Amino acid sequence: MSSSTVLDRGYRRYEGPREARARRLQTLFVAGLRRALGLRRTWRAKIVPWSLILLAFAPVQLFLLFALAGVENDSSTFSYGGYLEATTLLLLPLAAVTGAEIVCGERREKLLTLIFTRPVTSAEYVGAKLAVVLAILASVTLAPLALLFVGNAFSAPDPAVYLTEHLYELPRIMAASLVVIAYFGTVALAVASLFDRRGLAVVATLGGILVASVVVNTVAALALAQDSLLAGRLIRLLDPAALPYGVVDWIFGQPVEAGAPTGPVALVALAIYVLVSLKLFLNYATKAGA
Amino acid sequence: MSLIELSGVAKAFGRVGALDGIDAVVDSGSTALVSANGAGKTTLLRILLGLEAPDRGRASVVGHVLPAGAHAIRACVGYMPEGACLPSDVSAAEFVGFMAQLGGLPPRHARERTSEVLYQVGLAEERHRPIGGFSTGMKQRVKLAQALVHDPALVLLDEPTDGMDATGRSEMLDLILRVRREFGIDVLVSTHLLGDVERVCDRVIMLHAGAVLAQGAVADLKQNEQPAFELELHDNSAAVVAALERAGLGITAKGDGRLVLRGGEDVPERVRDLAAENGWPLRRLVPRAATLEQTFLQLQRIASDPITALRPRLEEVASL
């Protein structure tokens, strides 16, 4: 006869540790990152984010292949500012997809009504979502540029000399990447917070930025055609697609395009875009939780 | 110390008043918050969680005064909202674990608690299935599980049996009973279903038009009603009804041929005498069990009709 006994698995009160704000922020961040990258979900959810991330590394991979094959490095092809501008084609859709993925589902399913029943503030929620977007966008801007910097150093005749002579590039890379990802990230979150459907949010983000850019450039061109340089520059401050690259050029010491706003002015305009977008997203979170 | 103390709590949305000076005390146990739909139950629950700020009045929950104590309250109170609020493409285990961590539990403890709570609510087998494929009853259980997973001192349940079939509703009510009796967690249930209240709650707070209509033990409130008796005669004709009315009895036709009589404790004796005098063949005369619903409807009628409400007071004054 068996000596085993069946024990009643009654409810047990929890007497373990309870962690504070950092745990809540980490939980929101990790959950957002998983959702945005399609982790623990079907392969379909992984296709778009991972394709865009891998594509962002393609130029660096080519560069490293050339370097390994002994092909001479053409620094103009692989300048850091140029690389950052080239990744826009990927950055913008990735920002739109990420923003939509981490916001629209929760909005549609009214998940915020539950999230805010825990000790989570709307500012913490916004901070965690912003951190997710910035982390993912940094992976297609900062990470390839860092790799490019390392690659440049190791393909140089004397890596130590390259590192010493080009150390000033690192803060530039950091600052320029931060400007670009903060801008596209916050705009994508703000637009996504207006839609329940991810597809609509992505189309609205991409379409909004591209259409606005075309309209602003057309109006700016008309102003410049009438020799109104100041008006042209002011109007181009409204160009949502080109604005961050005016700042990037300024950070990397590139000459400002004729008729484009100067670097500091573009930086102020960009900061306003970022703050307004954050405010819109915060308003959404506050209303959704209330 | 009481679990919840409300003093003059009022809240309006624009010109629409949701709560109008609520004074109530909730002690440890299971308490129901009862009103018709749209009478301010959910608003009151949201105020208790610190998600809405009252326009005036004072509220404290589990010893924390609002609004300063909102975060502390949310850390030790669970909330099961009404309506859909669950992610469809995430498993029950993942979602409840997420909510546990938002409640401050470390990941390992959150996983253990999630398994424990999903087992207790009857979702042990289904915990790794996406919530989108769950029935309404299973989704309600997930909502209850997330409210319990951080082991709160109090759970606020907003219409917990909403949209459930009879079996699911009965199982949910059993679960709520267990939450109080076995888990030792105090419960505040918001509902408009008074049958549910009688089954799971010790105390009740009745709201009407944003104000407290009555509050107290369920058993006490049921006794507030005037005794009633069900009468069934061979022939409940108009003449019989008229004779009963002449005898001073309040009569309500039930629709199934029976009459409900009110008029004091001596109704059976008076009906017996009338039946004997008139030769009515008496089929059935039994006391009618008082229900909370009758009490609530009666109180609601009185509150809605100020003249009726004032009449006993006027009679009291007149008798002096």
Image (cartoon, coloured by chain):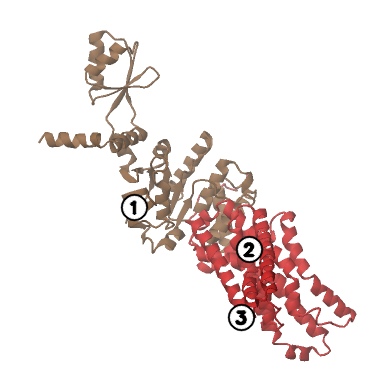
**In which chain is the residue bearing label 1?**
B
Name the residue furthest front. A226
Q: Is residue B317 visible?
A: yes
Query: Is B138 in front, or is A200?
Result: A200
Dot 3, how many residues are within 10 Å of its Cα: few (below 14), some (14-19), or many (20+)? few
Chain B shown in which color? brown
Question: Marks 1/2: CA distance?
Answer: 39 Å
**Element at label 3:** helix
- Whether tag 1 and tag 2 are in contact, CB under 8 A, the answer is no
Chain A shown in which color? red
**In which chain is the residue bearing label 3?**
A
Q: How many marks?
A: 3
Query: Is A48 in front, or is B26?
Result: A48
Q: Which residue is mark 3?
A: A264
Q: Which residue is mark 2?
A: A188
Q: Is A11 on the left-hand or right-hand side of A160? A: left
Q: Which residue is mark 1?
A: B10
Q: Nearer the viewer, mark 3 or mark 2?
A: 3
